[in-house]
Image: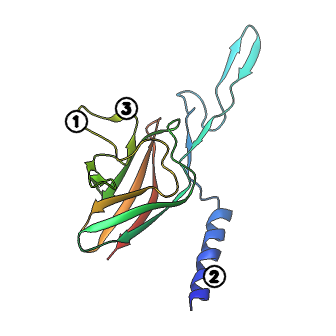
């Protein structure tokens, strides 16, 4: 039975990958330029084309599990680290509402990780960059709840890194 479930998940993953379902964030979309082509401008009779810079949301795997009736644990299991160079902040939401992220010491924070410029006067992040394999965070969520880890890029775009409904 487990083998069938594994094979079904693997074939679904392969189908998604072959269909081109990847999270891509372009940082060079400028007004007047065509998306994906880069900007072209004429200078002194020559044409200069700047290459398209593509920024990807980190490809990460979080394990999201219920610890008790009120607490859900999120563990970065594998994939890329969340790096400062393309990330503004990472939040966690429960049923679509941003919630405090609790670090391993039990302290609540507004963000999982965030640039200093994203933090308000009395705001904090549960960890510093990079977020890597093994980092653990907790959120409060009772009953059946959908937990989502949401990435915000430096250019203002967002991507859901992981989402799961826990019972």
Q: Earlier in the sequence, mark 2 or mark 1?
A: 2
Judging by the rendered image, the residue that carries numbered circle 3 is: 116
Q: Which mark is residue 122?
A: 1
- Residue 23 in the image: state x and y as whole percent: 55, 52
In the rendered view, how is the structure colored?
A: rainbow
For label 1, count other residues whose C-alpha is less than 10 Å away and answer few (under 14), some (14-19) or many (20+).
few
* Residue drawn at point x = 26 percent, y = 38 percent: 123
Q: How many marks?
A: 3
* Residue 93 lies in quadrant: bottom left
* Mark 2 vs mark 3, CA separation in Å: 43 Å
Q: Nearer the viewer, mark 2 or mark 1?
A: 1
Q: Quadrant of residue 119?
A: top left
Q: Is residue 104 above or below residue 34?
A: below
Q: Can you say whether 37 is above or below 104 in the image? A: above
- Crowding around mark 3 (Cα neighbors within 10 Å: few <14, some 14 to 19, many 20+) is few
Q: Quadrant of the N terminus?
A: bottom right
Q: Secondary structure at mark 2?
A: helix
Secondary-structure class at tag 1: loop
Q: Do the residues bearing badges 2 and 1 touch, measured as CB atoms within 8 Å?
A: no
Closer to the chain start, of discs 2 and 3, is: 2
Q: Dot 2: few (<14), some (14–19), or many (≥20) neighbours within 10 Å?
A: few
Q: Which mark is residue 161?
A: none
Distance between the alpha carbons at the discs numbered 2 and 1: 48 Å
Question: Which residue is situated farthest in the front direction here?
Answer: 105
């Amino acid at each position: 039975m487990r083998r069938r479930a594994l094979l079904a998940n693997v074939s679904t993953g392969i189908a998604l990958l072959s269909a081109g379902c990847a999270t891509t964030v372009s940082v060079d979309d400028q007004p007047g330029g065509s998306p994906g082509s880069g900007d072209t401008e004429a200078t002194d009779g020559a044409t200069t084309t700047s290459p398209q810079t593509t920024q990807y949301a980190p490809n990460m795997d979080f394990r999201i599990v219920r610890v008790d009736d009120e607490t859900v644990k999120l563990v970065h299991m594998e994939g890329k680290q969340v790096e400062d160079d393309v990330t503004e902040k990472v939040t966690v939401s429960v049923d679509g509402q941003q919630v405090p992220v609790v670090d391993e010491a039990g302290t609540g924070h507004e963000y999982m990780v965030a640039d200093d410029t994203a933090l308000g006067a009395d705001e904090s992040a549960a960890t510093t960059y990079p977020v890597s394999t093994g980092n653990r965070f907790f959120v409060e969520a009772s009953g059946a709840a959908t937990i989502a880890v949401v990435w915000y890029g430096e250019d203002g775009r967002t991507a859901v890194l992981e989402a799961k409904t826990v019972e």
